[in-house]
Image (cartoon, grey):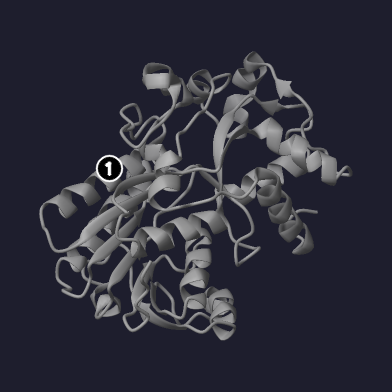
Amino acid sequence: MKIDTTKPVMVTGATGYVAGRLVEKLLNEGLTVHAPIRNPENPKKVKYLNQIAANSTGEIKYFKADLLEKGSYLEAMQGCSIVFHTASPFLLEIKDAQKELVDPALKGTRNVLESVNQVESVKTVVVTSSCAAIYGDTIDLLKIDNQTLTEENWNTTSSLKHQPYSYSKVVAEKEAWKIAKAQNRWKLVTINPSFVLGPGINPFATSESFSVMKQLSDGTMKMGAPDFEIGVIDVRDLAEAHFRAGFMEQANGRYIISGKDTSLLELGLILKQKFKQYPFPKNTLPKFLVWLVAPFVGMTRSMVNKNIDYKWRADNSKSKKDLKLTYRPLEETITEFFVQLKDAGVVK
């Protein structure tokens, strides 16, 4: 893998959970990272990135940009050989799905890639998509070969009204491929992670990943966890996947990035062994109970019907073959994540 450190690379959403570890990797490899963010003059926003940069051989440069402002990435993109587009909202509690999820995901992707079309130096674009663009609900796996997700699958069941976050990831990734296929100067690679956990560069970040860890430990699930299966990927392995997708010549197409097929209960049981003083779940709740309380805990009954008590399986072999990825054990990911949150006082 050849790494040309003479050319800068750009990372959108650099202050985010996933991007933080990617920026760290890039800086440690001696690269110059262009970080377009909304408020570069806000010291709180850049604090953790600056700490990483100070201890690395690379350099970080900030630019003012807005995901939804056309052309606002052009300045930051000048001279860059690779663009990593990680910026996209991950919110489950929303009022207006179109405005809060779909518009930022779709228009943001279009804005970044139309800028790429204007900047000759860019040769590779890596877009952070999601397994949510591959499937909508766990019940969907019953209809696919071997009931296991692959890069060939697309989510066809999500909409603005049902699983709008997943829908936003589908429309954004499809737009990325549409723009990429209309030209032949730069290559597009998409990274499709499962649920991201693990210690980030900022223990006080806000995302659903942090929320789930809190709910596992604060007593929310002490009566039991819903029988909800997920894939989990360590944020550090995900950063490595982005890095390799950008620099390895053989990287192509979509990549499912997922280390372990697991469940909320398994996460709780692993943590319970190490941190006995917390009320982690020890068993699963019957589906009918989850269905009854769903509206009171921010879930729809439709989501319960289509996701509880179904198996989640994904094939990560393409990432191992092309990107030569190895994945951390699940125990390491969630234990180190929980220790970080505990030490920071995020979980009490």
How packed is label 1: few (under 14 Cα within 10 Å), some, or many (20 or more)?
Answer: some
Q: Amino acid at mark 1?
A: Val
Q: Secondary structure at mark 1?
A: helix
Q: Going 48% across and 52% down the picture, which residue do you hit?
A: 325
Residue 86 visible to an observer of this rendering: no
The structure residue drawn at horizontal position 68% and vertical position 48%, both measured from the top left corner, is 334
Residue 282: image location, x then y, percent: 79, 29
- Tell me: 215 left or right of 138: right
- Depth check, front residue: 71 or 49: 49
Q: Classify the position of the C terminus by image quarter.
A: bottom right
289 sits left or right of 125 in the view: right
Relative placement, left or right, of 71 versus 162 is: left
Quadrant containing the N terminus in the rendered view? bottom left
Residue holding disc 1: 171
Say left or right for 124 vs 49. Answer: left
Residue 210: x percent and y percent?
63, 51
